[in-house]
Amino acid sequence: MAARRLNPSILEGEHRSRVFIGGSYRSASRALLSSLASAARDVAMIPVLADEYDLAVPEVDVHDTTLYLLHACRLAIFELSAMSGALMEIERVVDYGGIRWCYTMTLRVGRGRRIAMDGRFHEC
């Protein structure tokens, strides 16, 4: 059974305690977004991930609902390792006056062909 979707009109907490977590919601990147959400919870913030919310008419509502969710958060973190729809959100976060951080990961091949991932936060 699929997880029940949240109502975007009823958000947990207050504006000051919410952090929007954006990036690619495809399965390969979703685990990293979940890790960022967990880290937000560890510091008493309420993560908001757009793919957890119900869209009555997805092809119409995805744009407006996602921007609404972003606007309802004081902070935003964007994972930018893969191209995704987050570019629209990053562009608007400045208009909303939110504090924003981007998380980027780089894959590098080390000695012995070992692959390492470096991740870092920086201001968008």
Image: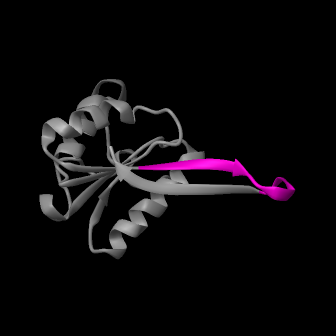
Q: Position of residue 69 (x, y in %)?
A: 23, 45
Taking depth in this image into account, of 87 and 28 the one nearest to the observer is: 87
Q: Vertical placement of 59 versus 22: above or below?
A: above
17 or 113, which is in the foreground?
Answer: 113
Is residue 109 one of those drawn in magenta?
Answer: yes
**Which residue does the image show at 19% across and 38% down from the upper left?**
94
Q: Position of residue 98 (x, y in %)?
A: 18, 48
**Left or right, 35 with reference to 90:** right
Q: Residue furthest front?
A: 111
Image quadrant containing the C terminus: top left
Along the viewing direction, whichever of 91 and 52 lies nearer the viewer:
91
Does residue 106 appear to the left or right of 80 in the view shown? right
Residue 57 visible here? yes
Name the image colouring. Answer: one colour
> In this picture, is 8 found above or below 63?
below
Residue at x 18%, y 54% (from the top left corner): 74
* x and y percentages locating residue 53 in the rendered image: 32, 47
| Left or right: 69 in relation to 82 | left
> Magenta part of the protein: which range?
103-114
Q: From this viewpoint, is residue 1 visible?
A: no
Residue 107 counted in the magenta span: yes
The outermost residue toward the top is: 60
Please count the marks in the image: 0
Quadrant in which residue 57 is drawn = top left
Give percent across and percent down for residue 50.
34, 45
Comparing 104 with 72, the one in front is 104
Residue 89 sits above or below residue 40 on the image? above
**Res. 31 image quadrant:** bottom right
User: What residue lies at 28% left-to-right and 38% top-to-bottom?
Assistant: 66
Q: Which residue is at a point 16% across and 49% down the rendered structure image?
A: 72
